[in-house]
Image (cartoon, rainbow, N blue to C red):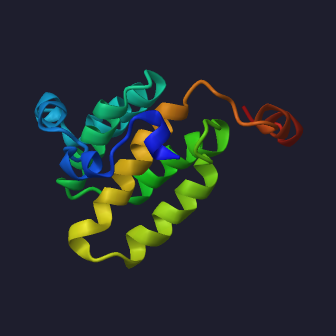
Amino acid sequence: MARDRGFRGTELLNQLPYPREDAREAVRNVEPNRIRGALEEAIRGRDQARAAALVHRYSETDQPIRPLWDLLLKYAISEDGALHHEKFYRTTVEEFSSARTPFKWRYVIALARVTASGFGYPAPGHAEACRLLGIS
């Protein structure tokens, strides 16, 4: 029960949403063609705030979404974490395509956070599947 961990329901209402202003400011000058590389670094560094801010920054550009999906999918299948990355990736893709425009990117920002949080926890069977398929 959430109450057992000292959580009060109203606390959630008062939390600032991701990405926080300081994180957005820190990536404001990242050039559009460098955002995906910086996002990959943030994921590998398990930096959730930066990953979320970089996806927000990406949403402000005119770049296509597919390369971003591909990057996030790479980690959704290779890392496990506690939040079922593959399932959340699929949910995010579905919600992005059906959500109202002002809310679409919230799903991708959340996926970036989840992806960064789970880096370093290899998905069971991923290494064996890659070996059997002859890919690295």
Residue 77 visible in the displayed image:
yes
The one nearer the camera, 131 or 91, is 91
Number of numbered discs? 0
Place residue 26 in its image quadrant.
top left
Q: Is residue 11 above or below residue 91?
A: above
13 left or right, relative to 98: left
Q: Position of residue 25 (x, y in %)?
A: 10, 33
Q: Is residue 64 visible?
A: no
Q: Residue furthest right?
A: 132
* Left or right of residue 83: residue 117: left
Q: Is residue 10 left or right of residue 125?
A: left
- Name the spot of residue 3 as percent of width and height, x first: 44, 43
Tell me where residue 102 sits by quadrant.
Answer: bottom left
Q: Residue furthest top?
A: 45
The quarter of the image holding the C terminus is top right
User: Closest to the observer: 2 or 20?
Assistant: 2
In the image, what residue occupies the spot 17% across and 54% down?
60
Q: Residue furthest front?
A: 4
Look at 85% across and 34% down and name the residue there: 128
Residue at 19% from the left image edge and 44% from the top image edge: 16
35 over 100 or under it: above or below: above
* Residue 95 horizontal/vertical position (percent): 43, 70
Q: Position of residue 88 (x, y in %)?
A: 55, 55
* Point 28% across, 35% down: residue: 34
Q: Is residue 30 above or below residue 59?
A: above
